[in-house]
């Protein structure tokens, strides 16, 4: 069949909208019509050429929601017309990682996914017979996609696609980092570096669990109002204070119980660790830093009890947790609507990247 998609032909070039050939689902695969997709900073990161796994030509996008159109042989858990969210972190429930119960990082298809291919090491997308690569196993900048059954969360049918697509990455990443990775407790002091599409979700989850001080750090003062609306109690403009770490340590009487880096900058990653409370403070790294970047600190920071952790997809097990997060949104426990600042047609998808780069948007959503 044919599908309309935004193609990333090479690093740094604008996406072009084209008709693409899409082969049908094979064993264990599902054909999905994507109804809406968010644009995450990670799409920009890969398009920019900074991603060591970036591969071109490819179809980016990993924050989608849609409807099952067809299923391949052997698919048991999904059927035509089911509503789904594609998962860049699948949940096979059989691999060593899934069975460990210690991580959400299912590895059953990670190596082919990282090479832009389906689990059988081929692509379903092509133009004039030449393969176009998949991205993060999802490629939601295509109206139709083929994905493995284990990379789809089945969601309730009354959930609006144009909102819950954001649960495919940003909402789950921010909310999950608080609930599943850090397990923030009521009364904790929390610091959030970067008040964008991820950081604001960290803030709303920190408020949800009853955190005491919720300190936001950003260089864009325009982020202050929306962050306060979501639960931020103090704002630090990193460009206006002499020392970000000292400012936070003073505000928190010794340091944060939990800090979250939601930028992808190695300087703020270090600040995120060093602003933590001696003895127990935990720094959770969410931001993705460019190829070749490294983090550093004095080992003394760790010896004296601060903890550096990472969080991918918020530590969420997609098929299990994503349907619950959709329920929380539908029950009014999570605010997604106010974070979706722009709605675009696929033809205008490059504007979504411009809005992100200029700091005008929190999340842009493309509607098919
Ligand atoms: N670990 C994971 O599973 C995931 C990681 N990410 C990563 O999280 C990061 C954030 O993504 P989004 O929220 O979508 O990005 P965004 O572009 O919406 O937000 C980034 C925010 O950081 C602020 N910022 C930039 N430089 C700063 C600095 N030096 N100091 C203070 N603030 C600064 C910006 O003003 C903006 O408000 C990215 O690196 C993205 O790749 C995104 C999704 C999932
Ligand atoms: N290819 C990138 C990896 C970037 C990365 O860390 N991705 C996150 C999700 S970011 C979503 O917006 C992730 O889930 N990581 C775990 C994984 O297995 O990739 C690079 O190499 O930098
Ligand atoms: Zn993302
Ligand atoms: Zn697994």
Image: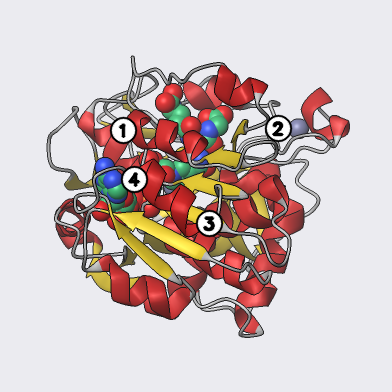
Q: Residue 94 location in percent, x, y? A: 85, 32
Marks 1 and 4 close (CB-CB < 8 Å): no
What is the spatial separation of the Cα atoms under label 1 and label 4, in whole angstroms? 29 Å
- Seen in the image, is 251 located left or right of residue 18? right
Judge from the rendering whether residue 261 lies leftward or rightward of residue 107; answer left or right.
Answer: left
In the rendering, which numbered label is found on residue 46? 1
At horizontal 23% and vertical 36% (from top left) the residue drawn is 8
- CA–CA distance between discs 1 and 3? 36 Å
In the rendered structure, find residue 244 and report the number of the disc placed on it: 4
Q: Which residue is mark 3?
A: 252
Give the mark, 1 or 4, whose residue is nearer the N terminus. Answer: 1
- Give whichever of 331, 4 is nearer the camera: 331
Disc 4 is placed on an element classified as helix
Packing grade of label 1 (10 A; few <14, some 14-19, many >=20) is: many
- Kind of element beneath mark 2: loop
Question: Can you tell me whether the CB of the residue at mark 4 lies under 8 Å from the nearest atom of ligand 1?
Answer: no
Position of the C terminus, as image quadrant, is: bottom left
Q: Nearer the viewer, residue 59 or 179?
A: 179
State how the image is colored. secondary structure
Local SS, label 1:
helix
Q: Nearer the viewer, residue 205 or 326?
A: 205
């Amino acid at each position: 069949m044919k599908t309309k998609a935004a193609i990333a032909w090479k690093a740094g070039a604008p996406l072009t909208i084209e008709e693409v050939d899409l082969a049908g689902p094979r064993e264990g695969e599902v054909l999905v019509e994507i109804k809406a997709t968010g644009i995450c900073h990670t799409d920009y990161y890969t398009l920019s050429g900074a991603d060591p796994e970036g591969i071109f030509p490819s179809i980016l996008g990993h924050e989608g929601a849609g409807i099952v159109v067809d299923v391949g042989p052997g698919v048991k858990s999904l059927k035509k017309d089911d509503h789904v969210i594609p998962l860049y972190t699948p949940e096979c429930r059989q691999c060593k990682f899934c069975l460990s119960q210690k991580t959400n990082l299912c590895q059953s298809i990670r190596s082919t996914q990282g090479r832009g291919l389906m689990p059988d090491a081929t692509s379903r997308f092509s133009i004039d017979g030449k393969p176009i690569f998949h991205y993060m196993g999802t490629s939601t900048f295509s109206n139709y996609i083929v994905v493995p059954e284990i990379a789809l969360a089945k969601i309730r049918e009354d959930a609006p696609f144009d909102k819950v697509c954001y649960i495919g990455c940003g909402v789950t990443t921010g909310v999950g980092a608080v609930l599943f990775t850090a397990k923030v407790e009521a009364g904790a002091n929390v610091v959030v570096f970067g008040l964008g599409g991820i950081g604001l979700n960290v803030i709303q989850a920190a408020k949800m669990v009853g955190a005491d001080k919720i300190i936001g750090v950003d260089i864009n003062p325009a982020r202050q109002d929306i962050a306060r609306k979501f639960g931020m109690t103090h704002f630090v403009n990193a460009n206006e204070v002499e020392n970000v770490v000292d400012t936070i340590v003073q505000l928190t009487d010794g340091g944060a119980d939990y800090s979250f880096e939601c930028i992808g900058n190695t300087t703020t990653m270090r600040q995120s660790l060093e602003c933590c409370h001696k003895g127990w403070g935990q720094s959770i790294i969410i931001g993705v830093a460019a190829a070749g970047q490294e983090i550093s600190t004095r080992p003394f920071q760790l010896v004296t009890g601060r903890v550096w952790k990472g969080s991918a997809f918020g530590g969420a097990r997609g098929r299990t947790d994503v349907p619950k997060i959709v329920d929380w949104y539908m029950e009014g426990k999570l605010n997604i609507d106010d974070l979706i600042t722009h709605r675009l047609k696929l033809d205008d998808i490059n504007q979504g990247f411009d809005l992100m780069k200029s700091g005008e948007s929190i999340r842009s959503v493309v509607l098919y």
